[in-house]
Image (cartoon, rainbow, N blue to C red):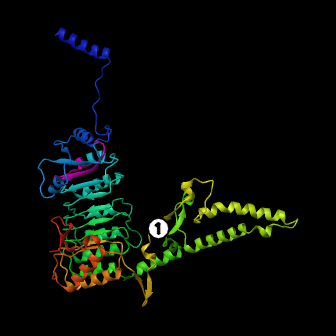
Amino acid sequence: MRKRVEKSSKEKVDKVDSGIDEEPSKTADDYQCSGNLELDFTELCKLMGVKKIPSVKMKQSKSAMDSQMTAWSSEPCLEIELENEDHDSVKAVKISGWKVDEMMLQVLSRTLPPLSNFQCLHMWRGGLTDCTFASLRNTVSLCSNLRKVVLDGNPLPEQSYYLLIGEDSMLTDLSLRNSRIGEEGARLIGSALSTVHAANKNLLSLNLAFNSIGDAGANHIAQGLRLNRSLLCLSLSYNQIGDDGAACLAEVLGPFALMHEEIVERRKLLIKGEQSMIQPSLVSLADSHEQPLSVRSSSSLDRLNKSAKNTTKKKDNPKKEEKPGPGQAAKKEEPKVAKKDDKVPRSQAGKIGGKDKNLPVSEQETVEVVETVIPLLDPGIVHTGGKVIHPGNTCLTSLNLSGNKLTEQSLKLFLSSLEGQGESGILRFSLNRNLFPSDCDSFLKIQEIMSLKDPLNKNNTGQVEDEHGEPKTTSAA
């Protein structure tokens, strides 16, 4: 017994003498992510006590990625896509068919934000709840370069998807297919797209296929399109939409009367002088270093140009100054100095061709800055019959209404709106698998308009939906 005690004390002395100390156990809070997703994800899962850690696999091919939409391995995994061969360049993460709980979302909230190239999050049938969705939304907001989010097959009781597309959202692409979105969810999403006082300015594509928004939901989405000028592509395929809902969508694509609330807001904007921001103008880069880029009204530019021309004429005609009187010489010296000083503000005001030799070449050049048109101050708005008529939403370029309950009655309304849009507006319009005959006159005319507007559709007779609700063209027989 005495020998054992002596041996134990000797080992302790040896450890102290050799300078070796037992490392304190790490916790998830102490762990510093390195930017290597495979390493960080696995290590954090261990530290947080995840019993079954999902594997991290590289994306092999597009066909393999698409095949997981209909079938997935029972083995949970994190599929990642790299920007290049560097393991620190993850640009896309996909989770398919396994439940993502709160603990797993805590791991993702630590490992995803440090990824500088992370652009796309694909979570298909992740078993999200309202609670876990709140955590996911927070993670999305922390990822500075994340632009595309796919949450297909994740129904939420509180229909809170709209929180992803608020006014300050940076997402450009959102897919919520097969998520049991009904009228209330559509109302919230429509309000997120735009209201009289605010609008989303970054979302370009929204896919709501295979939900149940119905006519009432389509009306709410249409209300959101009234004053939204960022959304380019919208899919409402297979949503039980009939003629009533379609009529609301057709209305916003063509001229529509402003409502009382919109007219009041328009008057407020006019009073504030915001109408000067409607037209684009040339603003010098030199001016951009003095103040934020702004758009000056054409009248103010005209005044500046006239002032510049008058100054040039006086400068080019020195004959009147050749024989000044004795008492006039000193008086004329002063305005000359003033004119020289005036050159800088004139060039900053956007005078074309005006350059300041003291500025770098890049700052002397001018660029055309196009301001986003405020919908309520659209120059195409007219007053007629006691109503204020807006020209309609011509920013939406792709609309998918396949697989609904539309009849020829609503096709006539769409035809009227499309004819009024001219060359702008809708370029791709999918209407297959509805309740009208394929040879009806309105449908054939719509197809003819689309074939003229869309160069990619010139040799096609129409568009059909693939099994995922995406538009797919079919060649003419």
**Image coordinates for residue 35, horizontal then vertical, percent:** 32, 42
Question: What residue appears at the point 42 percent right and 74 percent down from the top-left corner?
Answer: 375
**Image coordinates for residue 286, horizontal then vertical, percent:** 57, 58
Report the span colored magenta. Answer: 86-106
Task: For mark 1, give the secondary structure.
Answer: loop
Query: Which residue does the numbered mark 1 point to in the structure image?
Result: 371
Residue 188 visible at all: no
Label 1: few (<14), some or many (≥20) within 10 Å?
some
Question: Of residues 115 and 352, which is closer to you in this image?
Answer: 352
**Image coordinates for residue 247, horizontal then vertical, percent:** 27, 81
**Image coordinates for residue 198, horizontal then vertical, percent:** 40, 68
Question: What residue appears at the point 18 percent right and 61 percent down from the top-left corner?
Answer: 153
From what the image shows, is residue 333 above or below residue 139? below
Question: Of residues 12 and 364, which is closer to you in this image?
Answer: 364
From what the image shows, is residue 426 above or below residue 177? below
Question: Of residues 340 and 23, which is closer to you in this image?
Answer: 340
Question: What residue appears at the point 22 percent right and 70 percent down from the top-left corner?
Answer: 182
For the N terminus, the image quarter is top left
Residue 458 visible at all: yes
